[in-house]
Amino acid sequence: MPRGRPRQFDEEEALNTALRLFWRHGYEGTSISTLAKAMGMTIPSLYNAFGNKESLFMKAVCLYDLYGDKLYGEAFAKTSAREVALAILMGEVDLVSGAETPEGCLMVQGALATGPDSELVRQEMAKQRRQAEVDVAARFEEFQKAGQLPLGWKASALAAYVMTVATGMAVQAKSGASRQELIEVADMAMKIWPKE
């Protein structure tokens, strides 16, 4: 059986290009023609390689998840709730204001506001943001069970607080906040912890 023609593009590089475009402009703000041009493909070849725009976006999200896996993996390895929270916030500062990445957060701006045709994408992003908060709460619950959270603190509320600050920093970065300004926000957020 004859083999098909080899692909004329680097799939990983093309997907990384798509990720950067979605990250910078959001799902609805990135047209299929812009994607095809940036990826060095025709629109039909893009569809052939990645499916429709929604499918390409979801594949880009899987690539973006590698950033989150690293950030949260390193944070969850910390030995106190305070250190976990600080690592998440400082990791978010690096992610949303890094020189190597677009400003903001794909999970926040990528599909926060979408039209009816993109509702499934919006729902999937909301689901992933909720799951991240659940994971953070589970880590804080471990500290709570060990008696390492201040008395009266609730792990789920603390997780919601940390994730709300992280999300706000992503929005601020997209609005032009500097890295130093975001660091100051993270420092201010950490002042809720009593002196150890």
Image: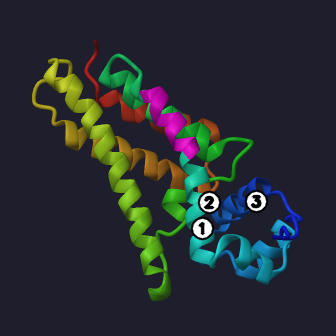
The residue under label 1 is 57
Above or below, 73 relative to 17: above
The residue under label 2 is 60
Within 10 angstroms of label 2, few (less than 14), some, or many (20 or more) residues? many
Q: Residue at x 21, y 42 (%)?
A: 156
Determine whether, in the image, residue 63 is placed left or right of residue 42.
left
Residue 46 appears in which quarter of the rendering? Answer: bottom right
Do the residues under discs 3 and 2 have CB atoms within 8 angstroms?
no
Determine whether, in the image, residue 143 is placed left or right of residue 151.
right
CA separation in Å, label 1 and label 3: 11 Å
Q: Which mark is residue 17?
A: 3
Residue 105 seen from this side: no
User: Residue 119 placed where, x, y %?
Assistant: 43, 80
Identify residue type, mark 1.
Phe
Residue 105 appears in which quarter of the rendering? Answer: bottom right
CA separation in Å, label 1 and label 2: 5 Å
Q: Check the picture and name the quadrant holding the C terminus.
A: top left
Residue placed furthest toward the left: 152
Which residues fall within the magenta stretch? 66-75
Above or below, 103 relative to 78: below
Do the residues under discs 1 and 2 have CB atoms within 8 angstroms?
yes
Nearer-the-camera pick, 5 or 104: 5
User: Residue 163 placed where, x, y %?
Assistant: 37, 46
User: Residue 57 placed where, x, y %?
Assistant: 60, 67
Identify residue type, mark 3.
Thr
Determine whether, in the image, residue 84 is placed left or right of residue 111.
left
